[in-house]
Image (cartoon, rainbow, N blue to C red):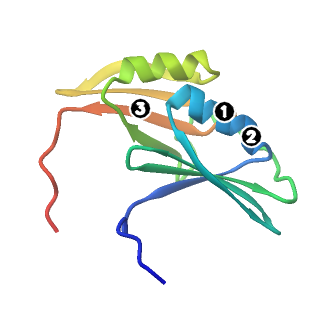
Amino acid sequence: MTTDSSSGALAIGIVTADAETLREFYVDGLGFSPIDVLEFPQGAVHRLARGAAELKLYQPAEAPAPKTRTEPWQSVAGIGYAALRTDDVAADYERAVAHGAETIIEPIEHRPDARMALIRDPEHNVWELLQEARRPPREG
């Protein structure tokens, strides 16, 4: 077995009843590129990437219950959103909304040298689109 040089990299996994439809949103709406589809007796994993970000859409063989939408989005403890770094938050926001994203917060400057927007995908998963001034690389 060879080791993966991206050890420590984070991949986000979303469980869905319709991976094809959700894949279309992430490809057309947020600019992800399809990597592959892995088939298992338990279901299928559609892997997508955008730069260093990896997204895994898992469609179990037995359809899962739909995700319950919570209001406000931050009212339930646990993993509540994912952040996607971008070079142009306004353009990515417009593209996502044009492909079915729901607006939570339109693009704003929320601190010096940083802009963000919050959206929901068609299955109510919350994403922060984040544009920041470049930070120095982390050591260690």
Closer mark to the observer between disc 1 and disc 3: 1
Specify the amino acid type for callout 3.
Leu
CA distance separating discs 1 and 3 = 18 Å
Residue extending furthest toward the right: 62
- Residue 24, label in figure: 1
CA distance separating discs 2 and 1 = 6 Å
Residue 29 coordinates in the image, percent (x, y): 56, 26
**Taking 43 as reference, is 23 left or right?**
left
Identify the residue under disc 2: 20
Dot 2 and dot 1 residues touching (CB under 8 Å): yes
Identify the residue under disc 3: 129
Residue extending furthest toward the bottom: 1
Callout 2: helix, strand or loop? helix
Residue under the point 15% across and 53% down: 137
Mark 1: few, some, or many residues within 10 Å (few <14, many ≥20)? some
Residue 40 coordinates in the image, percent (x, y): 77, 67
- Residue 108 against residue 85 in the figure, above or below: above
**Taking 29 as reference, is 17 left or right?**
right
